[in-house]
Image (cartoon, helix red, strand yellow):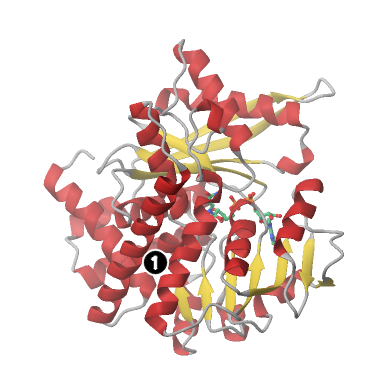
């Protein structure tokens, strides 16, 4: 599909095509899965603080709604494009099905450098984007959540704008909202913690001991910082961290709680933290460590980097960090890739819990959320691990086989519409 053409979308299609071959998927079902169901491009005129108007471009893509309403985050980043959003929406479809959630996949975004906007400008842009996509979203249709560059405050503005348009307070149209507005306990930590629950289970399967393992983490936002903290809590040593402004290294392990406290005081950035030596950000991915944790942008591990990484395993917290050509290199080198659709699914899983709680107007304790999250992550890993061993395929292909086959089966059962 030319209109979606981009490295990320080609990577997504390549994965789908390989998976379809392994599954012997019926051609008509395969073709339908290659096409997003709906794609919206919206213009987002925004008044800037100096009185001028800037027109941003926003997207929302609903890949499929076969198993239920669509679910997926909204990304604010300068590299957001139609093709990137389409790839991310497709991955959400496989992820939700893999985790057994009653959702299809979606994604949204605005091409913007959010760090250059004031809070007021961000609010005006967010409210305008929400009103443009409002006819196509809702608790039974499509439920956005945060992704890179967006957070609980963004969700509060979106939920408020949507509620104003409906004329009453709607909780279930967005997830990862502030607690007071129908959010769930543990949603903020869910992606990073869920990733580390998968890692712990994988260690049992692989015979690895998490205590003492060294890790390098790319991205220190919502996902990267929580994953780093959870790895350190298991006795791991996070020796390198990067964000969009630079990278830090400390061979004895960075003090992650102190780095988080520093970032909170410093607009989310790691720069200026005294507990590590600055390093070139491009060296982070090839730093010698046991575990590499990409937790920022997609497409960062290409064939060249794959030949140079010096780790035993990759915990893919970001979406689409590894390009398909890189996968084969990593496989040949015996590097274990714990794949994104499984690893970072804790976020959408607790988003599902939030939506269920909103629907019931009954909210759970942290322990209940945490216990259910761990159970679902461990169960999904076990299913993937068993299939990978049975079919002698990578954990990525096994995850995709489970996700894709469930969406395809839903389409077969329902017919041509969804
Ligand atoms: P975030 O905006 O909170 O943090 C992003 C981090 O990446 C920041 O530290 C930023 O400085 C850093 N970064 C940006 N560009 C970079 C670059 N070129 N090099 C190094 N670091 C860079 O975003 P997030 O919510 O933590 O999302 C991170 C990744 O996790 C994304 O790929 C997202 O799709 C994925 N993800 C997020 C969730 C979630 O619940 N938030 C769920 C599943 C997957």
Residue 20's place in the image compared with 291, above or below, is: above
Residue at 65% x, 34% y is 56
Are there few (<14), some (14-19), or many (20+) residues within 10 Å of tag 1? some
Q: Nearer the viewer, residue 306 or 335?
A: 335
Task: Tell me residue 356's x, y (percent).
Answer: 35, 35
Q: Hey, which residue is sitting farthest top in the picture?
A: 167
**Where, quadrant-wise, is the C terminus in this rendering?**
top left
Element type at marker 1? helix
Q: Which residue sits at x=76%, y=59%?
A: 258
Q: Nearer the viewer, residue 376 or 72?
A: 376
Q: Residue at x 32, y 36 (%)?
A: 69
Residue 109 showing in the rendered view? yes
Asked where in the image residue 298 lies, by quadrant, the reply is: bottom right
Residue in the image at 26% along x and 55% along y = 31
Q: Please tell me which residue lies in front, 47 or 229.
A: 229
In the rendered structure, the answer to whether residue 292 lies left or right of residue 175 reads: right
Residue farthest along the bottom direction in this orientation: 333
Left or right of 58 on screen, residue 5: left
The percent position of residue 307, horizontal first and vertical second, equals 58, 85
Disc 1: which residue:
14
Q: Is residue 123 above or below residue 85?
A: above
Residue 129 is at least partly visible in this image: no
Pointer 1 residue Cβ closer than 8 Å to ligand 1: no
Q: On the image, which quarter does residue 271 sit in?
A: bottom right
> How far across and how far down the image is residue 40, in percent?
46, 35
Left or right: where 356 falls relative to 302: left
Q: Is residue 349 left or right of residue 149?
A: left
| Residue 291 image position (x, y, % from top left) | 57, 77
């Amino acid at each position: 599909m030319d209109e979606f053409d981009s490295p990320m979308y080609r990577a997504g299609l390549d994965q789908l095509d390989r998976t379809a071959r392994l599954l012997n998927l019926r051609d008509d079902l395969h073709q339908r899965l290659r096409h997003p169901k709906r794609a919206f491009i919206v213009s987002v005129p925004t008044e800037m603080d100096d009185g001028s108007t800037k027109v941003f471009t926003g997207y929302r893509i609903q890949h499929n709604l076969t198993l239920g309403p669509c679910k997926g985050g909204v990304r604010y980043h300068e590299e957001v494009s139609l093709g990137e959003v389409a790839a991310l929406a497709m991955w959400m479809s496989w992820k939700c099905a893999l985790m057994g959630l009653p959702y299809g996949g979606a994604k949204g975004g605005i091409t913007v450098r959010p760090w250059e906007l004031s809070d007021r400008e961000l609010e005006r842009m967010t409210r305008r984007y929400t009103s443009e996509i409002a006819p196509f979203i809702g608790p039974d249709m499509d439920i956005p959540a945060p992704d890179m560059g967006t957070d609980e405050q963004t969700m509060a503005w979106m939920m408020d704008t949507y509620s104003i348009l409906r004329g009453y307070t709607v909780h279930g149209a967005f997830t990862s909202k502030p607690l007071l507005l129908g959010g769930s306990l543990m949603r903020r930590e869910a992606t990073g913690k869920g990733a580390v629950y998968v890692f712990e289970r994988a260690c049992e399967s692989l015979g690895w001991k998490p205590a003492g393992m060294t890790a390098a983490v790319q991205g220190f936002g919502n996902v990267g910082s929580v994953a780093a903290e959870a790895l350190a809590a298991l006795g791991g040593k996070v020796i390198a961290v990067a964000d969009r402004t630079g990278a830090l290294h400390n061979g004895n392990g960075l003090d992650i709680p102190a780095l988080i406290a520093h970032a909170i005081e410093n607009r989310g950035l790691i720069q200026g933290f005294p507990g590590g030596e600055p390093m070139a950000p491009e060296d982070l991915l090839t730093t010698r460590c046991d575990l590499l944790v990409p937790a920022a942008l997609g497409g960062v591990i290409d064939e060249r980097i794959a030949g140079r990484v010096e780790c035993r395993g990759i915990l893919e917290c970001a979406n689409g960090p590894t390009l398909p050509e890189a996968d084969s290199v990593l496989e040949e080198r015996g590097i274990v890739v714990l794949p994104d659709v499984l690893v970072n699914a804790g976020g959408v899983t607790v988003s599902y819990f939030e939506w269920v709680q909103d629907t019931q107007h009954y909210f759970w304790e942290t322990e209940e959320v945490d216990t259910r999250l761990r159970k679902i992550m461990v169960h999904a890993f076990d299913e993937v691990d068993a299939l990978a061993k049975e079919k002698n395929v990578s954990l990525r292909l096994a995850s995709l086989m489970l996700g894709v086959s469930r969406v395809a089966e839903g389409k077969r059962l329902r017919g041509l519409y969804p």
